[in-house]
Image (tube, helix red, strand yellow):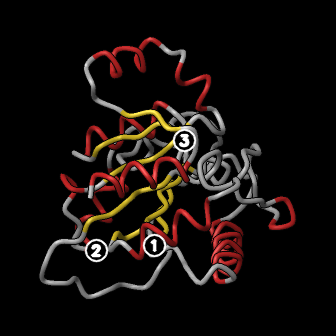
Amino acid sequence: MRQTPDKTPDRAPNRAVFLDRDGTVNVEKDYLIDPREFAFIPGVPAAIAQLKRAGYLVVIATNQSGIARGYFTHSQVAHLHQYLQTELKKYHTAVDAFYLCPHHPTAGSGEFTCTCACRKGEPGMLLQAAAELNIDLSRSYMVGDKGADLQAGISAGCHPVLVRTGYGEQTLKQAQTTAWLERGVIDVCADLAAAARLILARG
């Protein structure tokens, strides 16, 4: 589900950097919803600004099963994202679009408790963004701290980058991550700032 107004696609396909939110952009906190508890991981605002100056769209794609669980609402998540944008404005930058999945396959008991195609590691949010924002996924990146982020990027045809922030260290120890590393499927970076440097070095 998208949280930004529709845009008219440019004629030339865009490159994008998709970002997981919790543990990648902001300090990990379970079911974060209170703006007073929001904090950027150091270096994140500058990294976003650098990517945008280089011509990348910056798109946050986030699983928010707290909606399915009844912990908070869509409007509360939108309010938090508005706060995130306000904080980024201090650095003269912004996120281009937010996509969220409110679903969980088993938790909760309402309309959002279901199997869906948008919950990462499914690629639905990235595919939707590509269609709506004219993104060339083969020239784009997915940056996150969990295996589900990496799998969504791989399934969408993006290049996945694992950051060590958030749950990144735990993800790095998983067998699936080891297999991806052995095959050269993913890159590993200390944080989003390092990931941005890698992406920009590749042009």
Q: Between disc 3 and disc 2, whose residue precedes?
A: 3
Above or below residue 72? Residue 76 is below
Residue name at image x 46 percent, y 30 percent: 147
| Three-letter code, disc 1 | Ala
Residue name at image x 52 percent, y 51 percent: 20
Residue found farthest to the top = 175
Residue name at image x 67 percent, y 71 percent: 84
For residue 97, the mark is 1
Q: Is residue 181 left or right of residue 67?
A: left
Place of residue 134 in the rendered image (x, y in percent of width and height, measured from the top left): 21, 72
Q: Between disc 3 and disc 1, whose residue precedes?
A: 1
Is disc 1 surrounded by few (<14), some (14 to 19) or many (20+) residues within 10 Å? Answer: many
Q: Quadrant of residue 38?
A: bottom right
Name the residue beneath numbered marker 3.
Answer: 104
Q: Quadrant of residue 96?
A: bottom left
Name the residue beneath numbered marker 2.
Answer: 133
SS for dot 3: loop
Residue found farthest to the front = 201
Q: Is residue 20 left or right of residue 117?
A: right
Residue name at image x 17 percent, y 72 percent: 13
Place of residue 37 in the rendered image (x, y in percent of width and height, measured from the top left): 84, 59
Above or below residue 177? Residue 56 is below
Of residues 134 and 78, the one drawn nearer to the viewer in this rendering: 134
Label 3 and label 2: CA atoms lie apart by 26 Å
Label 1 and label 2: CA atoms lie apart by 9 Å
